Image (cartoon, rainbow, N blue to C red):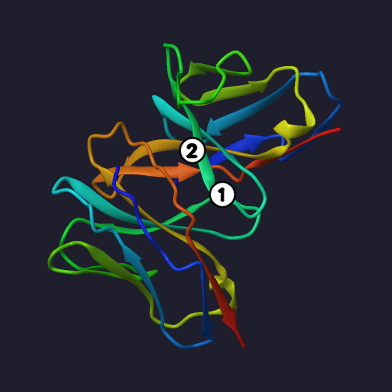
Amino acid sequence: DAKTTQPTSMDCAEGRAANLPCNHSTISGNEYVYWYRQIHSQGPQYIIHGLKNNETNEMASLIITEDRKSSTLILPHATLRDTAVYYCIVRARDNFNKFYFGSGTKLNVKP
Amino acid sequence: GAVVSQHPSRVICKSGTSVKIECRSLDFQATTMFWYRQFPKKSLMLMATSNEGSKATYEQGVEKDKFLINHASLTLSTLTVTSAHPEDSSFYICSANRLARGFNEQFFGPGTRLTVL
């Protein structure tokens, strides 16, 4: 699976949009981009995933660049409960569903 | 939504004893489950893939005799840490795949905190 690079940490003001970047410059054509988050001492929670089109759901939006070498997760109105470590993972759809987690971004939402 | 549970949530044991951790898919069947380990302030590390009805497959560097995995049914996988030592103290997380929203979504359990004295 392709390696991903994310900033170690980011701060965001409550109520503002949080934009979390991820670089995956070696992504191949059959690999999807997944985002999960992990609140302290809990299991990871699925947020969103995409292949090449931008995606939106009730939690977030995912913007993937045209060359697919990077993506941005957008939390439109961050709340204190969004404070967590956010993981960007790229995985081939047929890779027996294995996930290899990188170091992630610690998002600190501040009042 | 789909729920994956783990039991126990916390366990403290003496060095040299074995500890069993259960992972259950509560409202769906999972032919494949995964076990992860997470040290403090570190990311999740995939340990092994648990396959119902067959042997688990382990990631490189993970001792299969140390971490015994049994996937006896479509809703239960167990991880046994044998002869536990303080360096095995960690947060153990399982996950299970379920076809949802048109793709194989991976649902994670809440984790089990193991402390070996």
Q: Chain of mark 1?
A: A
Quarter of the image containing the N terminus of chain A? top left
Identified by mark 2, the residue type is Ser
Cα–Cα span, label 1 and label 2: 9 Å
Identified by mark 1, the residue type is Gly
With respect to residue A39, does B43 lie above or below? above
The foreground one among A45 and A63 is A63
Regarding residue A35, the answer to whether it shows in the image is: yes
Q: Chain of mark 2?
A: B
Labels 1 & 2 near each other (Cβ < 8 A): yes
With respect to residue B3, does A42 lie above or below? below
Q: Is residue B42 left or right of residue B60?
A: right
Q: Give x and y (percent) for residue A16.
A: 45, 88
Residue on which the image places disc 2: B95
Q: Give x and y (percent) for residue A41.
A: 66, 53
Q: Give x and y (percent) for residue A12.
A: 51, 83
- Counting other residues with Cα less than 10 Å from the Cα at mark 1, is it few (<14), some (14-19), or many (20 or more)? many
Tell me the quarter of the picture where residue B114 sits. top right
Q: Give x and y (percent) for residue A14.
A: 54, 86
Tell me the quarter of the picture where residue B112 sits. top right
With respect to residue B43, does A79 lie above or below? below
Q: Is residue B94 left or right of residue A101?
A: right
Which disc, if any, is residue A43?
1
